[in-house]
Image: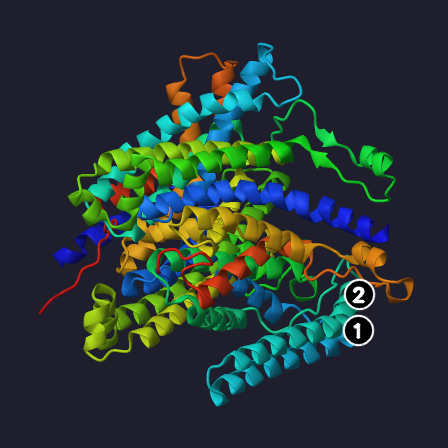
Amino acid sequence: MRQYTNVIVAYSIMILLIILVGVFQSWAIALSILNFCLISAVMTMGANIQWGYAGLINFGVMGYTALGGLAAVLVSVAPVEEAWSAGGINIVVCFFIIVGMIFSIRYILKKFPKSKKRNYVIVSLIIIGLVLLRLVSGPGIEHIEAVDPAKTGFLGGLGMPILFSWIVGGFFAAGLAYVVGKVALGLRADYLAIATLLISEIVIAVIKHEDWLSRGVKNVIGLKRPVPYEVDLQNTPWFIDLVEKFNLGKLKLINSVAEKQDVLNQLVIDASSVYVKLCFAILFLIVVIILLIITQKALYSPWGRMMRAIRDNEEAANAMGKNVVKEHLLIFILGSAVVGIAGAMMVTHDGLFTPGSYRPMRYTFLIWVMVIVGGSGNNFGAILGGFAVWFLWIEAAPIALFLINLFTSGLADTNAFKLHLIDSVPYFRFLMMGIGLLLIMRYRPKGIIPEKINIK
Amino acid sequence: MDFINAIVLLLNYIFVPALAYGSQLAIGAIFVTLIYGILRFANFATGDMMSFGTMIAILFTWYFQSIGISLGILPTALIAIPFAIIFMILYMLTIDKLVFSYYRIKKSPPVQLAMVSIGVMFVTQAIVRIIIGPFDRRFFDGERFILKAVEFKEMTGLNEGLAIKSTQVITLVVTVIVVSILFWFLNKTKTGKSMRAYSDNEDLALLSGIDPKRVVMITWIIAGILATIGGVLYGLDKSFKPFTYFNNMLPIFAAAIVGGIGNPFGAFLGGYVIAFAEIFITYAYKKFFTYVLPDALEPDSLVQLLSTDYKFAVSFSILVIVLLFRPTGIFKGRVL
């Protein structure tokens, strides 16, 4: 029991903080913080699988998140029939050209010995393929993007429930991770970091500018939700009754009927947004718990032991007959898939997909701060890191404002220096993140909840 | 005549801008590669360190402008650079003292130092945004063009104009001066040689009596100089915005690795490789072909290999290809 004390204490503090936000700010804010904490927790678990278990640096978190988001769009949006008939064939043909290129190159690679001639053939194949792609896709894309560009202008998706996209997002990310892993995993640690970061930038560039696929920077809005809409809830009798029951005491104090109705309406509107967020929180919590169980099991299984062995001493593990390259690739794929799930969850929560908002600061470096601060190699630590850092990221501005007012209380309200500081309150979150990361790395390098290995 | 027009067109839209952009990248890449070679970590704070240096230069420029000092046709920022460099070096040395030296003495793995540099990145970014704000700032003054497109047309009687911005020339001249001094320093002076020895083999360098503290300090000083100059040149040519500077870190990394990390000369050329590739591949050649080809063969489309949206993606793809086929970079760097 004793070894879990610090875990329990840390989590209680975290939950208490969120409850405090609920009491002092509002429950809607507290719940949306909680939701994003849970999403961040999934992301950190993914990064932790790669970094904590196997010591692989993946700075491409942003790319996998965006792919997960793309999955949410492609799964849930209804197909745009017009666009399909306008240019769908071209896209399908392009798909087959790509598949054909890959298979023919693989065939050549397998069949013929390494030689200059082979390289030339492969290069010419690629060039011919690219030209073909350009010729086939060009008119198709033009037609697709011309279909009602203000509203659609893309192929749409499959029109399935958005919850499927969480799994599909995982697969998308896993597919990308397979390719990236094949290319980059042989690199030394900090090169892997740079390479994955740059590859994720390429992914974002593609998602941002291929309008036929994702609408690009025009964004996809109004995605379907797995939970009820606020507007519908506000007109459902059982929900209104429920709100009334909850607030009986408050409502009793009001005498006039009209006023009572007004207050009740306001309460219903507030409660509906809280209810929706609560539903999301429950869904996310289920995902987090399932992932936590799986990852904990994996961590303490023979496989997890092997991963740690590879992480701590690659040569020794290799000498013991473990296939380091294969295991690295596998864990890279698994971790990325988890990040992809988180990406799909996030788009589901927001109800919109904005490719322009994927930036390395928020989706790569922040996630890494979470992993390091929480404690790499320990799932509970990673989740706590996600919670704590996200909480600080959101609440940094109010905290900074409070501190600025405290320290400059001697100055007049019109003081230029004070006004400048208050204007730049949003940027104090970067400062807090940076200082937090530096302090943790210096004085508690294993994170808030360090990795524990029981040796029997 | 058409042929000359076509060449002028390429000069105007590809060669001159790429040369300026490449110089800016090259200085940043040398900065990255020096830190990597001597301090042995990938510095993720590169972009933000450059924006910090530029910010100080801008503050000095504003001060000089307010008291009426100027260089006439040259931008005032040029006088501000030396002052900014002093502050930047102080900043670099402080960061090293407070943050990096601890891990260096402990001999932490490079990954840990890279993580720490992310912390530094966050802090530097915050400081820059708190002091100067996140907005676009232009601090260029003086004469904008050395050669205007219209003047060129009148002079030569060609259809195509060739415009040369003074910032482009300044960038090129300053880069040539800085880089030659740097290479002279690294190759000819005793301190430079000791730095290269330290980068090659730390233990051997220590055995032969090279003082590691001195080497590290000089590296940070050079890094501070390069960061400030590179940042100011970029800001003069385009504009200063903290977010762009942060993003510039990526092509700079690409340039350093493509050139062979740890190899300053490779990084220098890598900058140009990246810049030329980006602009070559995303330029629409339609007009060029209309000049060169006979009328019957004139293309209808833009003849653009990739749309300009993929500008960054081009440099990253080059990096991936280089990593795949020649992991030491084009000009042999460290083996990864």
Above or below, comparing residue A376 to residue A409 in the picture: below
Residue count near mark 2 (Cα–Cα under 10 Å), binned few <14, some 14–19, many ≥20: many
Tags 1 and 2 touching, CB below 8 Å = yes
Asked which quadrant contains residue A189, the reply is bottom left
Q: Residue at x 48, y 62 (%)?
A: B322
Left or right: residue A155 compared with residue B102? right
Towards the viewer: A232 or B91: B91
Above or below, comparing residue A10 to residue A400 in the picture: below
Q: Mark 1 is on which residue type?
A: Ala
Asked which quadrant contains residue A239, the reply is bottom right
The chain identifier of the residue carrying mark 2 reads: A
Towards the viewer: A111 or B251: A111
Where is residue B256? Give x, y as percent.
45, 50
Towards the viewer: A72 or A376: A376
Left or right: residue B310 compared with residue A313? right
Residue count near mark 1 (Cα–Cα under 10 Å), binned few <14, some 14–19, many ≥20: some
The chain identifier of the residue carrying mark 1 reads: A
Name the mark on residue A86: 1
Where is residue B281? Give x, y as percent.
66, 58
Residue at the extreme right of the image, as rendered: B296
Name the mark on residue A147: 2
Element class at badge 2: loop
Q: Mark 2 is on which residue type?
A: Val
